[in-house]
Amino acid sequence: MKSAVILISGRGSNMQALVEGGTGLTFKAVISNRPEAQGLEWAASKGIPTRVVDHKALPDRDTFDLALGDAIAAHRPDWILYAGFLRIVGEKFVNRFHGRLVNIHPSLLPSFPGLHTHRRALEAGVKIHGATVHFVTATLDSGPILIQAAVPVLAGDTEDTLAARVLAQEHRIYPQAARWLAEGKIEFPRNGVVQSSASGVSTDTLISPRTAP
Protein backbone atom coordinates (compact mmCIF):
# COMPACT_ATOMS: atom_id res chain seq x y z
CA MET A 1 0.00 0.00 0.00
CA LYS A 2 1.30 3.46 -0.92
CA SER A 3 1.94 5.93 1.89
CA ALA A 4 2.05 9.68 2.31
CA VAL A 5 3.12 12.43 4.65
CA ILE A 6 0.91 15.53 4.72
CA LEU A 7 2.34 19.03 5.20
CA ILE A 8 0.16 21.76 6.71
CA SER A 9 0.46 25.27 8.09
CA GLY A 10 -3.04 25.92 9.44
CA ARG A 11 -6.41 24.27 9.95
CA GLY A 12 -5.75 21.58 7.34
CA SER A 13 -9.18 21.28 5.75
CA ASN A 14 -7.63 19.64 2.69
CA MET A 15 -5.74 17.32 5.03
CA GLN A 16 -9.08 16.27 6.52
CA ALA A 17 -10.50 15.71 3.04
CA LEU A 18 -7.53 13.50 2.19
CA VAL A 19 -7.66 11.46 5.39
CA GLU A 20 -11.42 10.93 5.17
CA GLY A 21 -11.55 10.65 1.39
CA GLY A 22 -10.97 6.94 0.93
CA THR A 23 -7.79 7.49 -1.04
CA GLY A 24 -6.19 4.12 -0.30
CA LEU A 25 -3.08 5.85 1.03
CA THR A 26 -1.60 5.17 4.44
CA PHE A 27 -0.88 8.48 6.16
CA LYS A 28 2.40 8.15 8.04
CA ALA A 29 2.50 11.64 9.57
CA VAL A 30 1.24 15.20 9.47
CA ILE A 31 4.02 17.77 9.72
CA SER A 32 3.59 21.52 10.19
CA ASN A 33 5.98 24.46 10.05
CA ARG A 34 3.78 26.24 12.61
CA PRO A 35 3.33 24.86 16.14
CA GLU A 36 -0.05 26.60 16.44
CA ALA A 37 -1.52 24.91 13.34
CA GLN A 38 -5.03 23.76 14.23
CA GLY A 39 -4.77 20.73 11.98
CA LEU A 40 -2.22 19.07 14.25
CA GLU A 41 -4.79 18.42 16.95
CA TRP A 42 -7.24 16.98 14.43
CA ALA A 43 -4.60 14.67 12.95
CA ALA A 44 -3.59 13.46 16.41
CA SER A 45 -7.24 12.73 17.20
CA LYS A 46 -7.24 10.39 14.19
CA GLY A 47 -4.19 8.55 15.44
CA ILE A 48 -1.82 10.08 12.87
CA PRO A 49 1.63 10.97 14.23
CA THR A 50 2.33 14.71 14.17
CA ARG A 51 5.52 16.73 14.10
CA VAL A 52 6.43 20.42 14.08
CA VAL A 53 9.44 21.78 12.24
CA ASP A 54 9.16 25.44 13.20
CA HIS A 55 10.71 27.62 10.51
CA LYS A 56 10.94 30.53 12.97
CA ALA A 57 13.16 28.49 15.27
CA LEU A 58 15.72 27.84 12.54
CA PRO A 59 18.26 30.33 11.20
CA ASP A 60 17.61 30.14 7.46
CA ARG A 61 15.72 28.41 4.68
CA ASP A 62 18.41 25.83 3.97
CA THR A 63 18.44 24.71 7.60
CA PHE A 64 14.66 24.51 7.66
CA ASP A 65 14.53 22.60 4.38
CA LEU A 66 17.07 20.07 5.68
CA ALA A 67 15.20 19.60 8.97
CA LEU A 68 11.85 19.26 7.22
CA GLY A 69 13.30 16.84 4.70
CA ASP A 70 14.79 14.68 7.44
CA ALA A 71 11.46 14.65 9.31
CA ILE A 72 9.70 13.50 6.14
CA ALA A 73 12.35 10.95 5.17
CA ALA A 74 12.11 9.27 8.57
CA HIS A 75 8.66 7.99 7.52
CA ARG A 76 9.77 6.78 4.06
CA PRO A 77 6.58 7.99 2.32
CA ASP A 78 5.83 7.37 -1.32
CA TRP A 79 4.18 10.79 -1.58
CA ILE A 80 4.41 14.14 0.18
CA LEU A 81 1.13 16.05 -0.03
CA TYR A 82 0.93 19.77 0.65
CA ALA A 83 -2.40 20.66 2.26
CA GLY A 84 -2.28 24.38 2.94
CA PHE A 85 1.48 24.29 3.50
CA LEU A 86 2.44 27.97 3.30
CA ARG A 87 6.19 27.79 3.14
CA ILE A 88 8.33 28.12 0.03
CA VAL A 89 11.10 25.51 -0.04
CA GLY A 90 14.34 25.62 -1.96
CA GLU A 91 15.53 23.70 -4.98
CA LYS A 92 17.58 21.24 -2.91
CA PHE A 93 14.45 20.17 -1.03
CA VAL A 94 12.47 19.76 -4.24
CA ASN A 95 15.26 17.74 -5.82
CA ARG A 96 15.52 15.52 -2.73
CA PHE A 97 11.90 14.44 -3.21
CA HIS A 98 11.75 14.84 -6.98
CA GLY A 99 8.48 13.68 -8.50
CA ARG A 100 6.92 12.88 -5.11
CA LEU A 101 5.72 16.33 -4.01
CA VAL A 102 2.10 17.29 -4.74
CA ASN A 103 0.27 20.53 -3.95
CA ILE A 104 -3.25 21.91 -4.27
CA HIS A 105 -3.58 25.55 -5.34
CA PRO A 106 -6.75 27.69 -5.31
CA SER A 107 -6.75 28.80 -8.93
CA LEU A 108 -6.79 27.37 -12.42
CA LEU A 109 -3.05 27.35 -12.97
CA PRO A 110 -1.17 28.78 -14.74
CA SER A 111 -3.46 31.70 -13.88
CA PHE A 112 -2.91 33.38 -10.51
CA PRO A 113 0.05 31.56 -8.97
CA GLY A 114 1.07 32.65 -5.49
CA LEU A 115 -1.13 34.33 -2.90
CA HIS A 116 -4.48 36.16 -2.90
CA THR A 117 -5.82 34.16 -5.83
CA HIS A 118 -9.50 34.91 -5.26
CA ARG A 119 -8.94 38.65 -4.95
CA ARG A 120 -6.86 38.67 -8.11
CA ALA A 121 -9.44 36.63 -9.99
CA LEU A 122 -12.17 39.10 -9.06
CA GLU A 123 -9.98 42.06 -9.97
CA ALA A 124 -9.19 40.49 -13.34
CA GLY A 125 -12.87 39.99 -14.09
CA VAL A 126 -12.52 36.32 -15.03
CA LYS A 127 -15.72 34.32 -15.44
CA ILE A 128 -14.21 30.96 -14.48
CA HIS A 129 -12.03 30.26 -11.45
CA GLY A 130 -11.11 27.02 -9.70
CA ALA A 131 -8.48 24.79 -8.15
CA THR A 132 -5.50 22.78 -9.36
CA VAL A 133 -3.64 19.75 -8.02
CA HIS A 134 -0.11 19.76 -9.40
CA PHE A 135 3.35 18.34 -8.88
CA VAL A 136 5.72 20.65 -7.01
CA THR A 137 8.80 21.85 -8.85
CA ALA A 138 11.43 24.45 -8.05
CA THR A 139 9.34 27.14 -9.78
CA LEU A 140 6.42 28.32 -7.65
CA ASP A 141 3.04 26.86 -8.67
CA SER A 142 4.36 25.83 -12.07
CA GLY A 143 4.59 22.04 -11.84
CA PRO A 144 2.74 19.61 -14.11
CA ILE A 145 -1.01 19.49 -13.51
CA LEU A 146 -2.76 16.34 -12.25
CA ILE A 147 -6.35 17.56 -12.07
CA GLN A 148 -8.37 20.78 -12.08
CA ALA A 149 -11.90 21.78 -11.19
CA ALA A 150 -13.63 24.94 -12.39
CA VAL A 151 -16.32 27.06 -10.78
CA PRO A 152 -18.23 30.06 -12.16
CA VAL A 153 -17.51 33.53 -10.86
CA LEU A 154 -20.92 34.96 -10.00
CA ALA A 155 -22.18 38.52 -9.96
CA GLY A 156 -21.78 39.88 -6.47
CA ASP A 157 -19.08 37.41 -5.48
CA THR A 158 -16.68 38.43 -2.72
CA GLU A 159 -13.35 36.85 -1.93
CA ASP A 160 -15.06 34.83 0.79
CA THR A 161 -17.94 33.52 -1.32
CA LEU A 162 -15.64 32.65 -4.20
CA ALA A 163 -13.13 31.02 -1.86
CA ALA A 164 -15.86 28.86 -0.34
CA ARG A 165 -17.02 27.66 -3.76
CA VAL A 166 -13.45 26.83 -4.77
CA LEU A 167 -12.70 25.10 -1.46
CA ALA A 168 -15.62 22.72 -1.96
CA GLN A 169 -13.99 21.64 -5.23
CA GLU A 170 -10.57 21.35 -3.59
CA HIS A 171 -12.06 18.86 -1.14
CA ARG A 172 -13.40 16.86 -4.07
CA ILE A 173 -10.43 16.77 -6.44
CA TYR A 174 -7.55 16.36 -3.98
CA PRO A 175 -8.77 12.98 -2.66
CA GLN A 176 -9.40 11.94 -6.27
CA ALA A 177 -5.85 12.83 -7.26
CA ALA A 178 -4.50 11.04 -4.18
CA ARG A 179 -6.55 7.97 -5.10
CA TRP A 180 -4.94 7.91 -8.54
CA LEU A 181 -1.51 8.23 -6.94
CA ALA A 182 -2.28 5.32 -4.61
CA GLU A 183 -3.42 3.22 -7.56
CA GLY A 184 -0.41 4.05 -9.71
CA LYS A 185 -2.54 5.80 -12.33
CA ILE A 186 -0.46 8.99 -12.34
CA GLU A 187 3.24 9.33 -13.00
CA PHE A 188 5.56 12.32 -13.01
CA PRO A 189 5.93 13.46 -16.61
CA ARG A 190 9.05 13.54 -18.69
CA ASN A 191 7.58 15.92 -21.26
CA GLY A 192 5.75 18.43 -19.06
CA VAL A 193 2.33 16.76 -19.33
CA VAL A 194 1.08 14.37 -16.69
CA GLN A 195 0.65 10.84 -17.98
CA SER A 196 -2.61 9.44 -16.65
CA SER A 197 -4.58 6.25 -17.06
CA ALA A 198 -7.36 7.67 -14.86
CA SER A 199 -10.91 7.71 -16.15
CA GLY A 200 -14.46 8.38 -15.08
CA VAL A 201 -13.98 12.10 -14.47
CA SER A 202 -17.01 14.38 -14.43
CA THR A 203 -17.33 17.10 -17.03
CA ASP A 204 -16.52 19.94 -14.66
CA THR A 205 -13.12 18.45 -13.86
CA LEU A 206 -10.21 18.65 -16.24
CA ILE A 207 -7.29 16.22 -16.53
CA SER A 208 -4.72 15.37 -19.14
CA PRO A 209 -6.27 12.98 -21.68
CA ARG A 210 -3.01 11.15 -22.25
CA THR A 211 -2.72 7.55 -21.20
CA ALA A 212 0.18 6.07 -19.28
CA PRO A 213 2.06 3.29 -21.10
Image (spheres, rainbow, N blue to C red):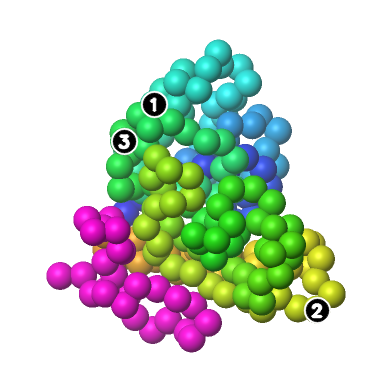
| C-alpha separation, residue under disc 2 versus residue under disc 3 | 43 Å
User: Which callout, 2 or 1, points to the residue nearer the camera?
Assistant: 2
User: Which callout, 2 or 3, points to the residue nearer the camera?
Assistant: 2
State left or right for residue 172 relative to residue 183. Answer: right
The answer to whether one can see residue 26 in this image is: no
Q: Nearer the viewer, residue 190 or 5?
A: 190
Q: Residue at x 31, y 33 (%)?
A: 96
In this figure, which residue is indicated by the disc labeled 2?
A: 155
Please tell me whether mark 2 sits on a helix, a strand or a loop. Answer: loop
Q: Residue at x 47, y 84 (%)?
A: 202
As drawn, which residue projects farthest toward the left? 213
Q: Main secondary structure of the magenta part?
A: loop
As drawn, which residue projects farthest toward the top? 59
Q: Residue at x 53, y 17 (%)?
A: 60
Sequence-wise first label, 2 or 3: 3
In this figure, which residue is indicated by the disc labeled 3?
A: 95
**Magenta residues, start to end:** 188-213
Amino acid beneath label 3? Asn
Q: Position of residue 156 (x, y in %)?
A: 84, 75
Total numbered badges shown on the rendered structure:
3
The answer to whether one can see residue 192 in this image is: yes
Sequence-wise first label, 3 or 1: 1
Amino acid beneath label 2? Ala
* In the image, residue 205 lies in the stretch drawn in magenta: yes
* In the image, residue 15 lies in the stretch drawn in magenta: no
As drawn, which residue projects farthest toward the front? 124
